[in-house]
């Protein structure tokens, strides 16, 4: 059993605080994706779990024991590095069996496990090669194989796919998912690609400037972000944010997005937003919730018209850029319903998916 | 353009294989080799003179009417003289060999550990320590030998090491360890830390990771350190001259100049024969390990 607990974890590099008091409970066999912008402390957190970095304050426990003072070699953790870090002077087989050999595993057992991992990863023909004779994708597989054969309590991945080209990245993403389904272990997976996080993880942890912004399932992160940062970070293309004013009118609330554009707030949110009446707020809506005009009966759907500024065809859908007030926003329409650039177009907005953000605290209300 | 060059090369241009290598590439290669010629000549000329002089008879050497650049026959008398009348083969050569091997083993092993520590460990004062090592290396031997005499004399009161090669085995590392440390420090820094960290996670202790992962990856750098160490100890003159007076304890470099030059009389033939033999091992080692040597040199130099 390998739950991981991080308790008030701090890390200072000299006087730079890389990680500022994070708390996290990772369950047994859970796949956790750690995402956030560059420099937010993802790698540092991972390295502290692995034992490669000293902890400034706080506790890390793996299983039931606190591992703050346990050497990396005794933590039973395997890590896949961004640059793979294969042993260049060993063959693929030796690379994969190195950890087992150090643990004095019997020879037949080593062979059995290496062959099994090689089969899972489809690298059986490469076992005799040296790392420099492999392609990037193959090296990546060997690096994973090296971790798999050990059957560790915890897998750590530090942006394992970021050195691969786009196509291979998607392929390996699926591969990793399959492997996790087959080889159940606790996984902490660092990435700054939020698509990777959404597709792979049981739960996503969004970090920013050394603190955890929010933890939740991919759906929660997508539908109910708690902060402006998470709302902006999760989703691609990202959520639109429009400065707005909340107004009260005959029993209900509405948001004014520009001089001539106001939309009523769904009735069940009146209590939630009641205190904001008259204040300048940020209105958040994802591109797919503003579409070409469609017939609707739902009271949360509203129509409006705007000029098309730019079109970005994506195949299945077309991104339509329009101006609301001073703000340029992205909307998502079916390609055949789209007007030409410069012409006007009718849209439907689904207010059930709106978010209201307090610009002072940057919290989603 | 290409048809022009074909007509220019004429009939020889039709030979097999010529068409496969583009003409500009061949020209470039030729230019490179021609550019190297003066250097090769410059570097090999002393060696040639050494060899050619050592196989001349004394009469031929002293005959000013004859060109010094070639010999009329092969005379072995100087080599025979070295063998019968001096301690060249049975003492000097052996002493030099013992000192070189011992000093290289000592310097490279201590220097490797020191370099690893300075490159990887984050202890207090690591940078000051690194600079200190470098400064030690900068102090000229010509200054250092004076206090070292005192050191040797003090030790000699307890264990007799003066006038033996032990004094050299003890003193050469004083300049070789800083040298090796500095050379390998740069090399270790070029080895990705992640590979080493992977070894820790795979179950290695720090020493285990050093032996099983870091050192195998550092082989070019270590070969380079070994070669430099061998060359510097083999050719060392000053300490050897200062610490050893006993004829049978001398090394080649000192033996040659003290025993084959008497006052203002130079025994040119034997002198050249001794130098020729003395230079051979170094040349052979470089010949064998040239590949390691160059790759080690560039890899260490980049960082
Ligand atoms: N060895 C170090 N010494 C000093 N500061 C460091 C060190 N390693 C990281 N930092 C700092 O700590 C902060 C967090 O770094 P970290 O490597 O954890 O970021 P990251 O989230 O992994 O970023 P990226 O997505 O770019 O890999 C950064 O501000 C970085 O500059
Ligand atoms: Mg990182």
Image (cartoon, coloured by chain):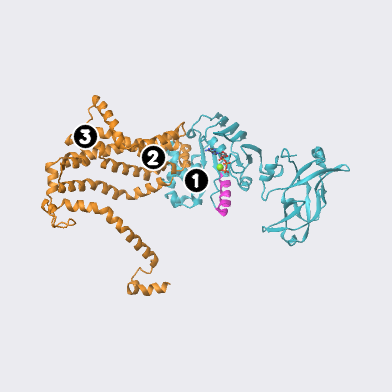
Chain colours: A cyan, B orange
The picture quadrant for ligand 1 comes to top right
How many numbered circles does the render carry? 3
What is the number of the mark on residue B182?
2
B13 vs A365, nearest the viewer: B13
Q: Secondary structure at mark 2?
A: helix
| Disc nearer the start of the sequence (3/2) | 2
On the picture, is B264 further left or further right than A195? left
Whether marks 3 and 2 lie on the same chain: yes
Q: Quadrant of the C terminus of chain A?
A: top right
The residue lying furthest to the front in this view is B264
Secondary structure mostly seen in magenta is helix
The image shows residue A257 at horizontal and vertical percentages of: 79, 48
Which contiguous range is marked in magenta?
Answer: A165-179
Cα separation between marks 3 and 2: 29 Å
Cα separation between marks 2 and 1: 29 Å
In the picture of the structure, the residue carrying the numbered disc 1 is A84
B29 vs A295, nearest the viewer: B29
Q: Quadrant of the N terminus of chain A?
A: top right
Disc 1: host chain = A
Check if residue A168 falls in the magenta segment.
yes
Q: In the rendered view, tell whether residue B206 sits above or below residue A259.
A: above
Please give the name of the residue rendered at 59% of the width and 35% of the height, measured from the top-left corner. Answer: A19
Disc 2: host chain = B
Please give the name of the residue rendered at 61% of the width and 43% of the height, measured from the top-left corner. Answer: A37
Q: In the rendered view, tell whether residue B168 sits above or below residue B302.
A: above
Identify the image quadrant of residue B96.
top left
Circle 3 packing at 10 Å, graded few (<14), some (14-19), many (20+), is: many
What is the number of the mark on residue B244?
3
Check if residue A84 falls in the magenta segment.
no
On the picture, is A338 further left or further right than A37? right
The residue lying furthest to the right in this view is A250
């Amino acid at each position: 059993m390998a739950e991981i607990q991080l308790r008030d974890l701090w890390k200072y590099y000299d006087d730079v605080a890389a990680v500022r008091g994070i708390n996290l409970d990772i369950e047994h066999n859970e796949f956790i994706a750690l995402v956030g912008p560059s420099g937010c402390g993802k790698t540092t957190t991972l390295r502290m779990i692995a034992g490669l970095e000293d902890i400034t304050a706080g506790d890390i426990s793996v299983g039931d024991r606190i591992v703050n003072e346990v050497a990396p070699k005794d933590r039973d953790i395997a890590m896949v590095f961004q640059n793979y870090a294969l042993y260049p002077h060993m063959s693929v087989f030796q690379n994969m069996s190195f950890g087992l050999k150090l643990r004095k595993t019997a020879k037949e057992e080593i062979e059995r496990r290496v062959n099994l991992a090689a089969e899972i990863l489809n690298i059986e023909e490469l076992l005799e090669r040296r790392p420099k004779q492999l392609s990037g994708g193959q090296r990546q597989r060997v690096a994973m194989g090296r971790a798999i054969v050990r059957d560790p309590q915890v897998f750590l991945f530090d942006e394992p796919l970021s050195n691969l080209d786009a196509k291979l990245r998607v392929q390996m993403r699926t591969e990793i998912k399959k492997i996790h389904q087959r080889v159940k272990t606790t996984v902490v997976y660092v990435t700054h690609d939020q698509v990777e996080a959404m597709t792979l993880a049981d739960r996503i942890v969004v970090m920013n400037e050394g603190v955890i912004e929010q933890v939740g399932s991919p759906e929660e992160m997508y539908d109910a972000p708690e902060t402006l940062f998470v709302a902006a970070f999760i989703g691609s293309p990202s959520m639109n944010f429009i400065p707005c004013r909340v107004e009260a009118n005959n029993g209900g609330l509405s948001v004014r997005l520009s001089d001539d554009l106001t939309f009523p707030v769904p009735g069940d949110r009146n209590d939630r937003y009641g205190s904001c009446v008259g204040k300048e707020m940020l209105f958040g809506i994802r591109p797919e919730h503003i579409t070409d005009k469609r017939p609707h009966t739902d009271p949360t759907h509203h129509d409006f018209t705007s000029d098309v500024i730019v079109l970005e065809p994506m195949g299945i859908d077309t991104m339509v850029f329009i101006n609301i007030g001073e703000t340029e926003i992205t909307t998502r329409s079916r390609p055949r319903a789209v007007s030409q650039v410069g012409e006007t177009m009718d849209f439907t907005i689904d207010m059930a998916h709106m978010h209201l953000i307090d610009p002072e605290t940057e919290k989603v209300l | 353009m290409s048809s022009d060059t074909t007509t220019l090369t004429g009939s020889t241009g039709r030979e097999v294989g010529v068409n496969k290598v583009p003409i500009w590439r061949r020209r470039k290669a030729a230019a490179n080799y021609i550019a190297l010629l003066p250097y090769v000549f410059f570097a090999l000329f002393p060696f040639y003179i050494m060899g050619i002089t050592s196989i001349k008879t004394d009469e031929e050497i002293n005959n000013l009417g004859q060109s010094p650049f070639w010999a009329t026959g092969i005379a072995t008398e100087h080599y025979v003289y070295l063998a019968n009348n001096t301690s060249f083969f049975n003492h000097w050569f052996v002493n030099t060999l013992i000192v070189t091997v011992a000093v290289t083993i000592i310097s490279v092993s201590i220097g490797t550990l020191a370099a690893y520590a300075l490159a990887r460990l984050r202890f207090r004062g690591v940078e000051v320590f690194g600079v200190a090592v470098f400064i030690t290396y900068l102090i000229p031997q010509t200054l250092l030998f004076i206090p070292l005499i005192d050191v040797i004399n003090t030790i000699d009161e307890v264990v007799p090491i003066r006038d033996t090669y032990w004094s050299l085995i003890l003193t050469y590392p004083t300049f070789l360890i800083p040298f090796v440390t500095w050379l390998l420090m740069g090399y270790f820094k070029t080895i990705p830390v992640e590979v080493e960290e992977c070894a820790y996670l795979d179950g290695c202790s720090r020493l285990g990771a050093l032996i099983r992962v870091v050192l195998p990856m550092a082989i070019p750098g270590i070969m380079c350190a070994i070669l430099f160490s061998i060359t510097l100890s083999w050719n060392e003159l000053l300490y050897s001259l200062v610490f050893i007076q006993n004829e049978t304890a001398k090394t080649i470099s000192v033996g040659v100049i003290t025993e084959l030059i008497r006052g203002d009389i130079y025994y040119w033939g034997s002198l050249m024969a001794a130098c020729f033999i003395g230079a051979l091992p170094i040349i052979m080692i470089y010949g064998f390990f040239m590949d390691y040597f160059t790759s080690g040199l560039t890899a260490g130099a980049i960082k």
